[in-house]
C-alpha cells in the first residue's frame, strides 16, 4: 500500500532528549488530527535514552547504572519492551497521520507504515524483512530480546544469520495514528544490556540476536540518515518542513509534565486507565 494522499511534511533528523522526542510524536499526531500537516520525520536521542514500554515494570530497569552512565529514561506511549537508544547507534523515525486515511486494523496499518522502512533498508543494501518464523523470547523486559513474531518483527542479514534490526510500534491519539521505530545502525551490547536489571544474557548473546547496519553495509551514519529521510519523503510525497513555534512550546510543556514526570516514568504497570 502506498502512502495516503495528503499534506505531508518531512522533518529531517534533529537531536533532542528522549522526553522531548516522545512529546513531539504526540504533538505531530495532534497537528494531523486537527487538520494540519501530516508528518514523517527522523530523529536522534541526545543524550542516549532508555524508553520503557507503556506497561513495563520500572523494577526491570537498572536505575543506578543508567544514572551513572548518563542514560536518560522515559516511558513510551506504545507497548512492548524497553529499548536502549544510543545517540550514535540508534536512528529513529516517526509517522503521524489522521486515523481515517489508514487501515483501521492494527496490523494492516502497521504494515502500510512499515513499507518505507523496508524500502529504506533495500536502498542501502540491507536484506531486511519480517522474520520468517517465531524465535523464542530471551528476556521479556527488553524489546530486542522478546519473542520474534512473523507478523511484525523485522530482521536482517544473510539467510543463515537473520537478526533483529528494528523495533516498530504504533498507537492512536485524538483521531490520529503515530508510528515510531528504532533502527539499529550499530550495536553497543554492553550498554543495551546495562540499562536492564540482571538480564539473563551476556553481550555476546545479545549480538547473536541483534544486528546493526554497520555490520552489513559500508556506509557512514550521515549517509544512512539521508537515505532514510529521502525514502520517507518520496513515499509520502512530502515537502521540506519544520515545527511551528506553537508545536515546540506544546512539546516542551508535555515533556516536562508527562515524559519527565516521576508519575509517568515510575508508575507501576496496570495502574493506568
Image (tube, rainbow, N blue to C red):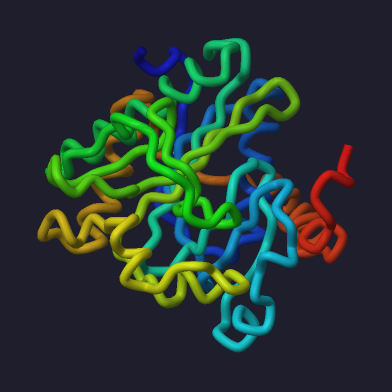
258 is higher (above) or lower (below) than 159:
below
248 is higher (above) or lower (below) than 197:
above
Residue 6 shown left or right of residue 196 in the figure: left
Q: Which residue occupies the foreground of this view, 255 or 149?
A: 149
Residue 176's spot in the image, x, y percent? 65, 24
Q: Which residue occupies the foreground of this view, 82 or 37?
A: 82
Residue at 75% across / 49% down in the picture? Answer: 250
68 is higher (above) or lower (below) than 182:
below
Residue at 58% across / 73% down in the picture? Answer: 198
Count of numbered circles on the image: 0
Examine the rendering and report whether any part of residue 74 can be seen.
yes
| Quadrant hosting residue 119 | top left
Residue furthest bottom as drawn: 68
Residue 33's spot in the image, x, y percent? 68, 23
Residue at 51% across / 63% down in the picture? Answer: 84
Residue 208 shown left or right of residue 57 in the figure: left
Examine the rendering and report whether any part of residue 233 can be seen.
no
Q: Which residue occupies the foreground of this view, 261 or 243?
A: 261
Quarter of the figure with the N terminus = top left
131 is higher (above) or lower (below) than 49:
above
Residue at 74% across / 57% down in the picture? Answer: 57
| Quadrant hosting residue 212 | bottom left
Residue 231 shown left or right of residue 266 in the figure: left
Residue 228's spot in the image, x, y percent? 30, 43
Residue 56's spot in the image, x, y percent? 70, 53
Quarter of the figure with the C terminus = top right
Amino acid at each position: 500500500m502506498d502512502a495516503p494522499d495528503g499534506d505531508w511534511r518531512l522533518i529531517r533528523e534533529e537531536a533532542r532528549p528522549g522526553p522531548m522526542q516522545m512529546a513531539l510524536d504526540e504533538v505531530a499526531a495532534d497537528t494531523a488530527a486537527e487538520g494540519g500537516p501530516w508528518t514523517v520525520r527522523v530523529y536522534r536521542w541526545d543524550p542516549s535514552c532508555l524508553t520503557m514500554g507503556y506497561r513495563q515494570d520500572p523494577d526491570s530497569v537498572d536505575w543506578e547504572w543508567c544514572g551513572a552512565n548518563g542514560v536518560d529514561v522515559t516511558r513510551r506511549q506504545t507497548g512492548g519492551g524497553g529499548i536502549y537508544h544510543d545517540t550514535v547507534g540508534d536512528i529513529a523515525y516517526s509517522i503521524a497521520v489522521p486515523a481515517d486515511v489508514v487501515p483501521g486494523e492494527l496490523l494492516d496499518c502497521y504494515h502500510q507504515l512499515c513499507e518505507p522502512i523496508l524500502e529504506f533498508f533495500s536502498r542501502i543494501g540491507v536484506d531486511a524483512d519480517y522474520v520468517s518464523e517465531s524465535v523464542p523470547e530471551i528476556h521479556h523486559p527488553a524489546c530486542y530480546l522478546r519473542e520474534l513474531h512473523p507478523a511484525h518483527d523485522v530482521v536482517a542479514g544473510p539467510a543463515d544469520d537473520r537478526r533483529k534490526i528494528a523495533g516498530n510500534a504504533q498507537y492512536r491519539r485524538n483521531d490520529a495514528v503515530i508510528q515510531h521505530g528504532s533502527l539499529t545502525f550499530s550495536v553497543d551490547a554492553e550498554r543495551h544490556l546495562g540499562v536492564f536489571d540482571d538480564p539473563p544474557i551476556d553481550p555476546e548473546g545479545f549480538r547473536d540476536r541483534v544486528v546493526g547496519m554497520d555490520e552489513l553495509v559500508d556506509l557512514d551514519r550521515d549517509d544512512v540518515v539521508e537515505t532514510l529521510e529521502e525514502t520517507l519523503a518520496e513515499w509520502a510525497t512530502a515537502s521540506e518542513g519544520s515545527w511551528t513555534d506553537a508545536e515546540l512550546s506544546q512539546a516542551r510543556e508535555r515533556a516536562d509534565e508527562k515524559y519527565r514526570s516521576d508519575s509517568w516514568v515510575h508508575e507501576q504497570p496496570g495502574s493506568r486507565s
